[in-house]
Image (cartoon, grey):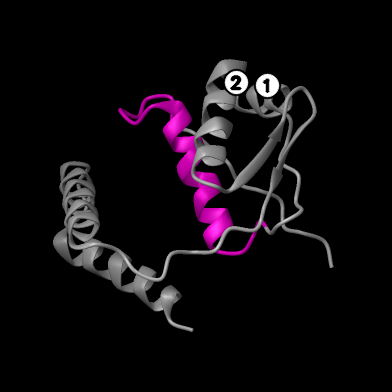
Amino acid sequence: MAKPKLMIRIDLNSPVPNYRQIVDSFRTHLVDGVLAPGDVLPSVRRLAMELGITFNTVAQAYRQLAEEGWLELKHGRRAMVIDRRLPSGASREKVTGFRLRIRQMVAQMRAEGLSPREIARELHLLTQELEP
């Protein structure tokens, strides 16, 4: 069975840096199992050209993912997904940080015109996807 095509998109008008958008997109694919150990990511050059951004931005994103333990980087060759065990739990400080980021995202959604009901529906849908 063929792997689904990776959907990596960035919003050049977003206040979120381009490299961070790339990291977040790949991290989602990694956690969701779309990318698995042994998969090879597009070359820095190819992804940069597809996204219309600089090579350095993609390289920065790949370095961040490597630092998080998701990728093995071979200079000038490839970025390959490696086996990474997910931590079994998060500290109270991490949970507090996640809560703050979620609140900031909800504030951004409201500022963009989504109603509290629409936001709640989206959050509910996301939590349902987490159920085994």
Secondary structure found at label 2 = loop
10 Å crowding of disc 1: few (<14), some (14-19), many (20+): few
Q: Residue at x 43, y 64 (%)?
A: 87
> What is the magenta range?
11-35
Vertical comparison of 115 with 10: above or below:
below
Nearest the eye: 39 or 9:
39
Instruction: Please give the count of numbered marks on the rendered protein.
Output: 2
> In this view, which residue lies farthest toward the right?
1
On the image, the x and y values in percent for residue 57 come to 53, 21
Vertical comparison of 117 with 11: above or below:
below
Residue 79, image quadrant: top right
Quadrant where the N terminus lies?
bottom right
On the image, the x and y values in percent for residue 6 come to 66, 48
Secondary structure found at label 1 = helix
Marker disc for residue 59: none
Magenta-span inclusion, residue 32:
yes
10 Å crowding of disc 2: few (<14), some (14-19), many (20+): few
Nearest the eye: 128 or 39:
39
**Residue 64 vs residue 119: left or right?**
right
Residue 2, image quadrant: bottom right
Nearest the eye: 85 or 58:
85
For mark 2, what is the residue?
52
Magenta-span inclusion, residue 46:
no
Q: Residue at x 67, y 52 (%)?
A: 82
Q: Residue at x 22, y 42 (%)?
A: 112
Q: Residue at x 76, y 44 (%)?
A: 40
For mark 1, what is the residue?
49
Say which amino acid is labelled 1.
Met
Say which amino acid is labelled 2.
Gly
Q: Mark 2 and 1 residues: CB-CB less than 8 Å, in contact?
A: yes
